[in-house]
Image (cartoon, rainbow, N blue to C red):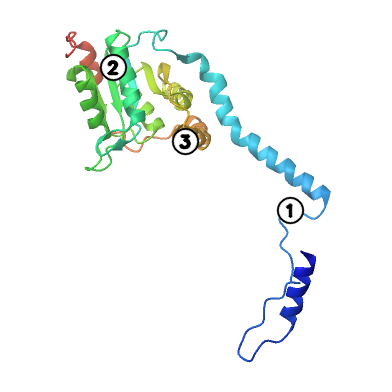
Amino acid sequence: MREWTRQLRTRAARPGPPGFPRLPDLEGPRLRLLPGTRRAQRRLLRWAVALCVLALLPTTWLRLTQDSRVRSEQDVPSEPVAMVFGAGLIDGTPSPYLAHRLDAAVRLYDDGKVRVILATGDNSRTSYNEPGAMRAYLVAHGVPDSHVVLDYAGFDTWDSCDRARRIFGVDQAVLVSQSFHIDRALALCKAAGIDAYGVGVDEKHDATWFASGTRELLAADKAALDIAVKPNPHFLGRREPGVTRALAAPPVARQP
């Protein structure tokens, strides 16, 4: 290897035919990826560890403070409302993750754990109606249409929680989402004034699951900020009586 490098340097030093460029100088300055001294390298390592710890603090705090509120579908206490958070559409229908959340909400409704389902999601443009697709799925799976309430401005978890409390008057609920998201949803709803329990939907630990879990690291930082600042949602608007009316309505036989 050394002999090959020496020959290449020798050829680079020779002038080539007229009009041909010379090879680049192989003796130029080298790019340093790490500090030159051991002391500086140790200092860099300490900073890297400190940054990793800081990045994980919000996620750890969410897990430690909210895990006691996460229950199974069988053990979760009965509450008036189930809140289902949007998780995307594919060709206008619920994505697999969203369908699994809705399936869990249907089971909670069938078991009498909840009486009304609040479907909260994104309808920021006419071509994308997440709550509408959620309602269609729930009704197709037997939940009476009169017991499904839609929030069209649940653009993120904080907006969904804050609007559920301030717009729809929800103060007790069962939250339904995947396990990697449920702690954050519980913390944000608690900050919004909702006494909630959570049902974490199990998923296969595939690439999508790991990518979503990695995203939660950044989302946890935003959640900590939302809890501290409690900003207004993107759209607040006037109060809506949909949940109150649905709870006051007489029971409806399950659709076949």
Q: Is residue 166 visible?
A: no
- Residue at label 2? 106
**Residue 71 picture location, percent across and down:** 45, 13
Where disc 1 sits, the SS reads loop
Residue placed at 25% from the left, 43% from the top?
Answer: 125
Which label number is shown at residue 207?
3
- Residue at label 1? 34
State yes or no: discs 1 and 3 in contact (Cβ < 8 Å): no
**Residue 139 picture location, percent across and down:** 20, 21
In the depicted structure, whether residue 196 falls above or below residue 133? above
Where disc 3 sits, the SS reads helix
Q: Amino acid at mark 3?
A: Ala
Q: Quadrant of residue 144?
A: top left
Q: Amino acid at mark 1?
A: Leu
In this view of the protein, which residue sits in the foreground, 51 or 14?
14
State yes or no: discs 2 and 3 in contact (Cβ < 8 Å): no
Q: Cα distance, mark 2 to mark 3?
A: 27 Å
Q: Earlier in the sequence, mark 2 or mark 3?
A: 2
